Image: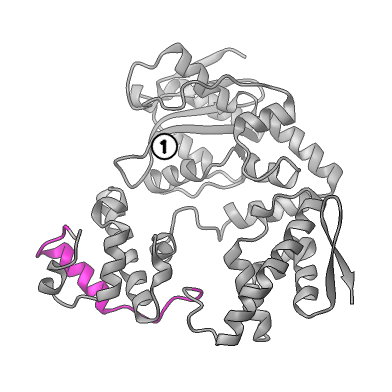
Amino acid sequence: MELEQITTGAALGPLLDQARTEGSCAVDTEFVWERTYAPALCLVQLATAQRLAVIDPLAGAPLEPVADLMADPAVEKVMHAPSGDLAAFVLHHDVRPRNVFDTQVAAGFAGYGGSPSLERLLEQAVGVRLRHDEGFTDWSRRPLTPVQIEYAADDVRYLLDAARALRRRLGNQGRQAWVDEEMQQRYGEGATLVQAPELAWRRVSGRGRLRGEQVSALAAAAAWREREARRRDLPASWLIKDATLIEIARRRPKTARDAESIRGLQLRKGAQLDGLLAAVAGAGPAPAGSSDGDLPGEVRRRVRVVLPLASAVLQARCGEAGVASELVATRAELEALIAGQAMDDDGDHPLLMGWRRELAGESLLRLLRGEIALRVLPRAPHVAEQPR
């Protein structure tokens, strides 16, 4: 296909009409994200079965019609690891992208490993080897060279082919329903496409040192930082670094004078500092799952001892099925499952729901209830379950 460079709304309209007619398109973006809260879109690449285009908003192409296409549930958007791309459309255009098929996630179910790069996926799934030498391009600078434009187009040039190959493989493996469930969870109506301020504390480095009211203060301060960074369109760390946020949570300052002694806090008397202090003062209870410090001592010890066994079961089940374990559970989720079972609390743990329960959850429950033992095997998957 001839590569089109689109710089006007008049040229963009027929391309988007083609995508709607076909009901599917491949989408990727190039953005810069170093100095802003929201990714700044510099280029949008779009491919249909018949057309391949690079849309340049910095040269005049409007992105509002592209945002409308992203929100159109009748058109499937095939993308690879699209979290940053989707966040840009949410934050800049106030739309909710719908009907997203993530080829990186699908590849994890198809046996191509966890979080494969686009280059590795294309080589394994469709036998295409890309030459990508422009990874550190400043996409906000113009003019772009022909090599840069070709590089950008390669991100969608073969993506529809890869999606078809993945679906064939998943169908043969009986995994398509699992993938559909996961896509709905990640990108469906109830999914979080942009980090909720209330959950920002989970990404603060050093939070594990805090307990009780300190965790509550951290959650409140991190949520304030997230909202303020979004309002000012600045990276959150430019307002307050993580180490300083931890110290604020530890000390819980009540006045501007209290805050002055906290190393690294650049905010001085004024509305911003007042807002931060008010957020810390109004902190609620510690968020759920914030710490194991409130667990009974025997439960904490059980978690430490049983975790390696549970991890072995998870890895064996995933290895046997050819599903990337990163898709199934994190270490924290395994720990939460062990603790919950120790306290007779099944709750709504993700490992006990949907395809995760089918793949590994039932085996983990049998392990935690003492119904199975583990036997070491000389070859993969290296561990086998044995009824007791």
Quarter of the view holding residue 221: bottom left
Of the pair 160 and 229, the residue shown nearer to us: 229
Disc tally is 1
Bounds of the magenta span?
266-289
Does residue 300 sit above or below 56 in this rendering?
below
Residue 158 locus on image (x, y percent): 65, 25
Residue 118: image quadrant is: top right
Image quarter in which the C terminus is found: bottom right
Judge whether residue 279 is colored magenta: yes
Left of 33 or right of it: where is 176?
Answer: right
Q: Is residue 333 magenta?
A: no
Q: Nearer the viewer, residue 4 or 197?
A: 197
- The reply, left or right, for residue 249 in relation to residue 374 is left
Q: Is residue 348 visible?
A: no
Residue at image position (72%, 50%) is 179
Residue marked by disc 1: 64
**Percent of width and height locating residue 236:** 31, 53
Along the line of sight, which residue is nearer the eye, 44 or 356?
356
**Which amino acid type is marked by label 1?**
Glu
Where 68 falls versus 51 (above or below)?
Answer: below
Quadrant housing the N terminus: top right
- Rendered view: 70 above or below 180: above
Asked whether 193 or 302 is in front, the reply is 302
The answer, for residue 81, to whether it is visible in the render is: yes
Looking at the rendered structure, the secondary structure element under dot 1 is helix
Point out the residue furthest to the right here.
387
Point 29% across, 64% down: residue? 245
| Left or right of residue 73, residue 170 in this image | right
Q: What is the x, y in percent for residue 147?
A: 47, 14
Residue 335 percent location from the top left of the image:
61, 71
Answer above or below: position of 276 versus 148: below
